Image: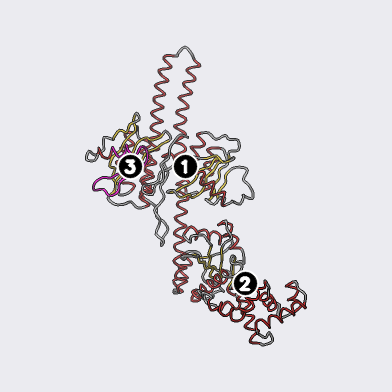
Amino acid sequence: MGGSRAHDRESGPPQGSGGRPARAAREEPRPSAPPPADPPLHDLMALSHALFDAPDKGEILRLAMDHIAAAGPYSAEAGYLKVGGDLVPSPRNGQTHAVAVGRRVRELAGQDGPVTVPGRPWGRALGLRGLEGLHGYLVVTSLSRPSEAERSLLATLVRHTAAALSVAFAHRRRREDALELRRLNLELRRSKEERTALQRQLISVMAEWGYQRGVHALMADVAASGGGEEAVTRALHGLTGLPALVEDRFGRLRSWTGVSRPDPYPEPDPVRQDEMLHAVAREVGPVRIKDRLITLVRRRGEILGVLALVDVRDEADEHTVLALEYAAASLALELAHLRNLAEVELRLNRELVDDLLAGTDEASAYARSEAVGHDLHRSQYVVVVQWSKRTVDDSFARTVGRAASAAGMHSLLTRRSDHVVLVADDRPHARALYEALARETGTRSGTIGVSAPSDSLGDIPHRYEEAQRALDVRRHSRERYGTTFFDELGLYRILGPGNDYRELERFVDEWLGQLIDYDSRHHAAMVETLSRYFDCGGNYDETAESLAIHRSTLRYRLQRIRDISGNDLADVEDRLNLQVATRVWKIVLGGPR
């Protein structure tokens, strides 16, 4: 398709694909209640019908300028239509800033950009683009900086205006083709075949115009129905006859309509998925990758998912591409709505977990947990998750939430500066959460600490410290990545979180320092032999077998340990301190270095 797209810019409202209309994302609802219906959005939908019924480009531009307030606290400063390669100002433009504004609009050369108007702190020139290219500009100003929701509504108005201009362009072209057909009919009456060919040309133009309006109307109805991804893929499959699918941005299937669905669906490769997303994002319009025609579903530049058609025989034409792009615009609205709901739920969860970790009254906590569907009456486990080279932001928090759900956990979630905290209503599986997060992140370099069970809400702050302790011990152990449960730490449960290990190092040096130095100088394994001896409960045969040495060799080593360290293994006090020292050396301080 030949349409150009408006680029997403941080300073201005986003544009839809090819300037075609798409519904605006709703404003983010308050955490305390579900998002209300959005009256401005209904006003814009009514305006959309009026725009498409307008007789010409001038009337469409006039309607858009007159109703700009439906999108927010805006004023239409000026409007321009592209005629014969030049931008012609609207008769409704004010005269005060006409020269300066007109000069600035021409300087933008088809791009969106800021416009300075005295007395109006915020101003933007927004291109009205369609499949045929730039149709004109709408210059909008405001006495205050628009909110994110108001920008989204303005973007919707601009897309609908651009789409109506495209339809008017096609309508005018149809009239011109009809006049041309009449002229040719008068000149070429001698050939019935020629008359038939010209009539087919006219029918084709009319069909194209009708198809565009039909696709727009269908996708607008799909978006309004609230049917989600499945409604979009059903409509797209019905329009094109090709299997249609939606994946999330990580490559996991969310909806498929049509034949030949893979079962099971392939597990995505995070590296290849990112490469694919960047490749498609660099192009204008849908991109063919192998047997799929792919377009990104985006909201203000953020990739929400992937919409694709499976086109094994390479049958897709311009009508298929048009339907795919309209479907992507409709799906962006649905996914943005779901994202808003997820963000509200995440905030509610976070506030509740923050209060639980700090200590809160039980009545309030129970009521709030019921509101978000979590049973606090059961025993709770606090889980702390830390992943190297991952910024702990909302995106990572959502990743942890997805992994927990995939691992079968029912949990509440919040985040701290360097870790994510889960409050789960059942003991996590020893490896399920870690493996799910490894798949989600594409790396296994993560550590998880799990507390002992909490049977009262008042214990949760203490359980949080236990989970941190378990994570801390794991991070300083030989195998720093994986899951550690506090109630399996044994001796190390008495070590408080946040220690810098200097006391532990001094203790180990006091009891094992001479042996460690001996091992370093002679490339020996006296400390490991002593550790294995204690692990085997002092049994000579088991210790020798675990070390793969002869019993006499073990006896010799133990005697050398007595000689080097000056400690007597038969002495109860020496034996206890040596056993603790070897445990700390092996698990907490990381063993041989």
| Amino acid at pointer 2 | Gly
- Rendered view: 162 above or below 467: above
The dot on residue 373 is: none
> Can residue 378 be seen in the rendering of this structure?
no
| Amino acid at pointer 1 | Met
Residue 155 place in picture, x, y as percent: 38, 45
Q: Which residues are magenta?
A: 102-123
Residue 105 place in picture, x, y as percent: 31, 39
Q: Please say which color scheme the image uses.
A: secondary structure
Q: Which residue is mark 2?
A: 591
* Disc nearer the start of the sequence (1/3): 3
Quarter assignment of residue 202: top left
Secondary structure at badge 3 equals strand
Residue 309 place in picture, x, y as percent: 55, 41
Q: Which residue is mark 1?
A: 219
Q: CA distance from mark 3 to mark 2?
A: 65 Å
Q: CA distance from mark 1 to mark 3?
A: 28 Å
Residue drawn at x 47%, y 38% as measured from the top left: 215
Quadrant in the picture for the C terminus:
bottom right
Between circles 1 and 3, the one closer to the viewer is 3
Dot 1 surroundings within 10 Å: few (below 14), some, or many (20 or more)?
Answer: many
Q: Which residue is mark 3?
A: 125
Residue drawn at x 64%, y 49% as measured from the top left: 263
Residue 483 place in picture, x, y as percent: 59, 67
105 in magenta: yes
Secondary structure at badge 1 equals helix
Secondary structure at badge 2 equals loop
